[in-house]
Amino acid sequence: MSTLLVEICLGTSCHLMGSQDIIDAIESLPPDKRGKIDLRGVTCLKTCRKGPNARINGVVLSEMTPERTLAVIEDNLP
Amino acid sequence: MHVSEVTKIRRKVLAEVSRLALEGTLEENIAGILSTVVSEDGPRYRCCVHKERAVLKDRINMALSQPIGTPLAEAAGKALGGERADLPAVNLLPEACDRCPIDKFLVTDACRNCLAHNCIASCPKKAIMVVQNRAYIDKTICIECGMCKRSCSYGAIIEISRPCERACDLKAIVAGSDRRAVIDYEKCVQCGACKVACPFGAISERSEIVQLIQRIKDGQRVYALLAPAFIGQFGPKVKPEQIIGAIGRLGFHSVKEVALGADAVALAEAGEFTRAVPAEQPFLTTSCCPAFVAMVEKHLPDAGDRVSTTVSPMIAAAKAVKEEDPSAAIVFVGPCVAKKAEARRYPDLVDFVLTFEELAAMFVGAGINVAETEAGDHLTAASRDGIGFARAGGVTQAVLDTVAHLAPGAALKPQRADGLADCLAVLTKMQQGALDANFLEGMACQGGCVGGPGTMADQRLTAKLVELYAGQAPVATAPDNTAARPEIDLHRRKK
């Protein structure tokens, strides 16, 4: 089964801006959706001043919120 | 733990102030924060960019520990010079307060315009009439007594309160004549619950990060006393040793555990318990939570002599460091805002108090990424019980275990309270002799310190991680810990 790679930055700057909220939002998706996501933590995406940062399908996205992240995931789910 | 937009703004200000102070350009560039944190095209939370910047000025003054209204360059200069205004720990930011125009009593759609009209009959001011088939409260006459709400058979009248007022268990924050919130410092114990509750971010604690950064730059030996709730504050994947390593990179001379002070406190408090209860007093309360101690002083002074005379773990740990290195500067790093007030009683022992949030902002300002930092020293010279002080029930456990060791026959009957409303209610009952207990653990924050206002992680998760970490401690209880220093005088200073 193909999965969508979602990487969330766990660096201090992103953590301070709430990256854990994004992880929690993804973790609490219903099993059918959660199962299609390969969720990984990364330690830096090199855009620290615009956190929280995420990389979805290889594309770095800045100033993310849980809502925006879930919307992007929704659009990209296999 | 949800990081709201106001939380983000507060944190950005702290990180920017740290960055500029570390770079040595704070005084020249302080006004730049107004445009880096709130950009012209950025998201807007207030009416206009001017209002947002006015609010930001209040926030910057607070981040510099200067009085609200101080011109920014002057405030920066004073902070760099080490000056700190004599401010309470918790302060209202007048520009940020939205003066919540809340009508305390509101008639909802559930109103049936019944025949009884109990609301109208009950209103002592005749402030209620029927308009468009529904009860209507004339706000110009209403005195907010609540009689109508109680009298309505349908429960159709609801009471709405401001978030800050509702959060304050001690009724220390009310709307002033201009509807701005006013903190009554005669009642306030600086717990920080209102800060967490205000959706406009209009309440904030003062921060001394700039003064601290200057002290580090001056080359003084600065020690961090790390409260045990630090586990997991930088995310569940970040190791405790990485946090310690990162603190070292900031220029701190050394990192010590507050949990070691907690062991000393457990020994002293257990000794006090076995001596004084029941011979001299019917029960003893803990004294490690400064907001709880202040609550007793301000709201239940009759119970003052029931409070343990032992200092808090912060002070115990600070004393131990000062004995070894009298010229040390000491920084408590923890989840607590009330510690900022407590530290002012011990200016010779504790120089600065940082919340975990402020520590993280300093890391960001310094460009230190804890997740990529190499592990520093492994700490835990403390016992399992000492580390357990971080969560509700931990102190009780530590004192129970210590009493069992010191005086195996003594019967300690514990009672716990967390949240100030709970603390006040339980302590009142114990004063009346209405509870079968002789030891009270009082914690101002729900869940204990892990639920404090200066934290960055969910308290349930932190409690779990603290538990795991405590499980790895080399010894279980305070009496087993040879590193604990009970011989230091651990008597608390009263107001």
Image: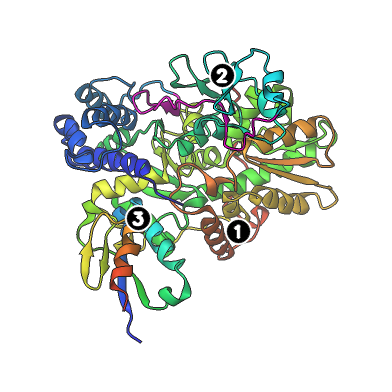
Magenta region, main secondary structure: loop
Question: Mark 1 vs mark 3: same chain?
Answer: no
Q: Mark 1 to mark 3: distance in Å?
A: 28 Å
Colour scheme shown:
rainbow
Q: Is residue B122 left or right of residue B1?
A: right
Q: Amino acid at mark 2?
A: Glu
Count of numbered badges drawn on the protein = 3
Tell me which corner region of the image, top left, top right, bottom left or bottom right, holds residue A60: bottom left
Please tell me whether mark 2 sits on a helix, a strand or a loop: loop
Which stretch is magenta? Answer: B88-114
Q: Mark 2 to mark 1: distance in Å?
A: 38 Å
Q: Amino acid at mark 3?
A: His
Return the residue at label 3: A15
Question: Mark 3 vs mark 2: same chain?
Answer: no
Return the residue at label 1: B384
Magenta segment includes B106: yes
Is B211 placed above or below B270 here? above
